[in-house]
Each structure stands twice: as structure tokens, then as C-alpha cells.
Image (tube, rainbow, N blue to C red):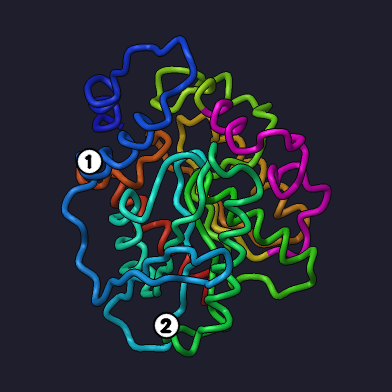
Amino acid sequence: DPDICRLLDTVFLVPPNPGPPDVAALRAAGEAAPKLLGGDPEPVAACHDDAGPAAGGGIPVRLYRPDANAPLPALVYAHGGGWVTGSLESHDRLCRILANRLAACVIAIDYRCAPEHVFPAALDDVDAVWKWAKEHAATLGIDGNRIAIGGDSSGANLAAALTLRLRARRLPQPRAQLLLYPALDAASSLPSYAAFATGYNLTAAQMRWYWDAYRANTPPQTPELSPLASADLAGLAPAVIAVAACDVLRDDGLAYAKRLRAAGTPATLIDCAGMIHGFLRWTGAVPAAVAWADAIAVATRATMD
């Protein structure tokens, strides 16, 4: 995509760093990018922060409500950022877009991040917010039977892992799972890691560092860490999976969609031509990202309905 090429040639020109990433710098960049590239935040009917579930002192959440009649369907949403960066602010614009296009209440989670909190802390937080949303659906003005789980990148990893955890506990599945350029293979073994190793913003080396920061000493083949390592993907929530054409994580999403379908789990795959990792937060600078967001929303609404 020509707008993506322009960003790669200008905004994303970063000198190589021979050492490990600076976590504070990564977090600052993660907050700055959507402000620079995301355009003006879309208005929603209501937006407010909440304390979230009380367990562990509370997990901050932010609720976005579109202009639609209650009870609303809902999307419990985990932000991306390699389990290290990201916040309610960094994904505010994207959550507004999702709320409006899905005509659903988006419940964004400010889960604990690595390296201060390693696996499974982030997943435990997503699990707790999921349970809280289900139990408080009436108070929140949402339809308890129409709650989906979703996320982008590392957040999509957490969404997919939650469906595996719920199945293991014999608990009801989400209405749908929305996985946006998901990270699903902790072994980083698929061909896209080599095909798009450098030159496309997120590098293979960076992604492997994120995996290591999050998993700590957890074996890469642990299914709740690496959903692609699960031997069985039957009985999970219907999925909408969007992948970027030029992304080290591209094959994670492609492989997961294929395996879900083989296991009898419905999976809609959206292959976003010309895009790179993270593009859905750059709708102010990349017009094609708006069109892809629309297409993803159409597929997700159909799945939730």
C-alpha cells in the first residue's frame, strides 16, 4: 500500500539497536504512534473508565458505548503491544472504531504487562474481566448471551488463549473471537518470521524478544501461551481472524484459521493486502486501514449475530 510505504520510509525509520530494547522507550513509542497516525478519535455515545473486577485490587477497564439501543452485544478487548506496551490510551481510537462499527459495547482491559508481570498474569486479568462482564451484564447494559472476546497482536493471543481456558474448565464459549494479526506461536517457527524479518516495522527479532519477555521460563509449547500448540481446536468460539500481508505474524493467523476449520470451528479469514503489523491504529494516515476495519466489522457482526 503506498501509504504504508510512505510510513516505512519516514515515520518508522529507526536506527538499529544492538542491545535489548528499552522498555520505557517502547512504551512511550506505543503511546505516541496512534496520536501521530490515528487521526481524530471517533465520537461514541458514552465512554467511561471503571474499576473492573475486584480481584487483585481491581483491573482497570474502559467501556465504549455506541449510539444503539440496550442491551448491547459486547466485545471484551485486550490491547496489543507485545504483552509489554499498550494501555487504555494507546488503543482508545481503535476501540472507538470497533464500538461504532460493531454497534457493541467495547470493554477494554488494562491488563498487567511484562516484564514486571509474566505469563499468565495478563491472561489471568483477561479471564477475570471476562467473568466480571458475564456476571454484571445486566448492570452494564449488555446482553450476557452476546459477548465476544477480541484483541490485536498480543491481545489477540490472550483472546485465543481465553477460549482454550474456558473450554478446559467446561465453561461457555464467547459468542465470537476477534483476532487481529494474532501472535499464536511462541516458538516463532513459521515462514513469515523469515519472509518479513526486517523492513516492515515489527521485526522478527523484536517479536522474539516480546515472546521471551512475556513467557519467562514457560515452555513455548504451552497451549495457553501458544494457542497454535494446542493439539485440539474443536469446540471453540467462532473466529474472525485478520492478518496483515507483510507481517512476521501473518502465518500465525493463517495457520490458526486453517486448524480451526479442520477441527470444525467456524473461522472467517480476512487477508489485508498491502498492510503491515499494527495498521488498524493508523486510520488517520492510511485510508485503506479504514476500509479494512469496515470489512472486519462486517464479518464480526455476522459472526456475533
* Vertical order, 182 against 47 (above or below): above
Q: Quadrant of the N terminus?
A: top left
Query: Label 2 neighbourhood size at 10 Å, few (<14), some (14-19), many (20+)?
Result: many
Which range of residues does the magenta coloring cover?
207-236
Q: Tell me the element at label 2.
A: strand
Q: Residue at x 42, y 86 (%)?
A: 141
Q: Residue at x 53, y 72 (%)?
A: 54
Q: Nearer the viewer, residue 296 or 111?
A: 111
The span from disc 2 to disc 1 (Cα, nearest Å) is 30 Å
Residue 260, position as x, y percentages in the image: 71, 53
Q: Which mark is residue 72?
A: 2
Q: Quadrant of residue 29?
A: top left
Which residue lies under the disc numbered 1? 37
Q: Amino acid at mark 1?
A: Leu
The answer to whether residue 153 is left or right of residue 214 is: left
The answer to whether residue 8 is left or right of residue 181 is: left
Residue 231, position as x, y percentages in the image: 83, 48
Task: Please check the rendered image and state whether residue 111 is part of the magenta-colored stretch, yes or no.
Answer: no
